[in-house]
Amino acid sequence: MVDRRSPPPASMIERMTLILGAFDGSAPRLTLQEIADRSGLPRSTTHRILDTLVRLRWLEHRGGGYRLGMRSLELGGLAVAHNELREATAPLLHDLHLRTQATVHLSVLDRLDIVYLDRVAGRGGSAVKTRVGGRTPAHATAAGKAMLAWLDPRVVDATFRDRLVPRTPRTLPTVEALAQELVAVRARGGVAYDREESAPGVACVAAPLRGSGRAIAAISLTGPARETDLVRLTPYVEQTTRQASAALFPRLPDDDSRRDHPVPSAWPPGALDKLLQGMGGDYWL
């Protein structure tokens, strides 16, 4: 919900963004009034912009409600399909799922949230309410903590202070508790746990993808809390992130005599730089 005490944005692009942002996984179909409430825009303004979005195929209008249209779906599909990070890790994610039978996620950090770039799930995956492109508060997730642990603690404090949204009674309640948790994550080499902090009945273990600096992503294993042995799953996710990190951040040999012969990489020269630039400034890398 948008704070109605703030004046509505004057830019048409900002207003359209507010309307499109009203849709999420929990509410794929919304009425005019629900969209106006979620966007914080006047009902008459909302209706006028909705007509334009329907005409341009960004939205569909059926049965008294609105939902995302084909143009939104097409654009979202292109964004996922062309994500180099997702393509580079996809085989490892599928192998990890086959070995553990847990739901596997590839996530990146975007301000206060993690964003799911990929998801591999089996029959039990329906119990884990996530989707590609979906968001979850970073401080409440194993993947988020695995990435936050490698940021400057001052940045974490400034970003999350007074903004920790409780998801369950087990969610970290204060920025001090988060800072203490991130110290423990770093002591484990980046391995982080979520024991029903993000959703009741759901547990998760994650590890970061990183070279010598910040984490660019995290891989996690998620399942029902009563059935998921996080300690048993930890070596699996650690091994997968080591493999992915080795492919993303190839190292030169230590022997000076072999300086002219770098280790072959799964990625061509400059590909990783292109990836990081393509992600843009919205991601913390």
Image (tube, rainbow, N blue to C red):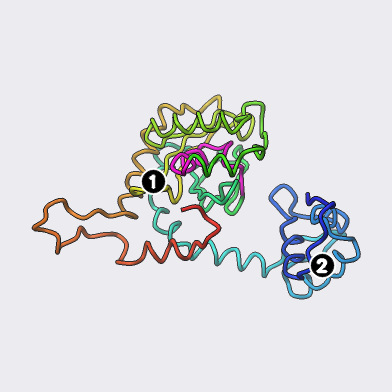
> Which residue type does callout 1 highlight?
Asp
Q: Is residue 168 left or right of residue 10?
A: left
> Which sits in the foreground, 149 or 90?
149
Mark 2 or mark 1: name the one nearer the start of the chain: 2
> Which residue type does callout 2 highlight?
Leu
Position of residue 63 measured from the top left corner of the image (x, y, whole percent): 86, 60
Crowding at label 1, few (<14), some or many (≥20) Cα neighbours within 10 Å?
some
As helix, strand or loop, the secondary structure at mark 2 comes to helix
Residues shaded magenta: 135-152
> Which sits in the foreground, 67 or 145?
145
Residue 268 is drawn in which quadrant? Answer: bottom left
Q: Is residue 149 left or right of residue 129?
A: left
Q: Is residue 32 above or below residue 170?
A: below
Q: Is residue 117 left or right of residue 127?
A: left
Q: Which one is closest to the eye, mark 2 or mark 1?
A: 2
The structure residue drawn at horizontal position 48% and vertical position 48%, both measured from the top left corner, is 106
Residue wearing tag 1: 95
Does residue 30 show up magenta in the picture? no
As helix, strand or loop, the secondary structure at mark 1 comes to helix
Cβ atoms under marks 2 and 1 closer than 8 Å: no
Position of residue 72 measured from the top left corner of the image (x, y, whole percent): 67, 66
Residue wearing tag 2: 50
Q: Is residue 85 left or right of residue 71?
A: left
The structure residue drawn at horizontal position 58% and vertical position 50%, both measured from the top left corner, is 111
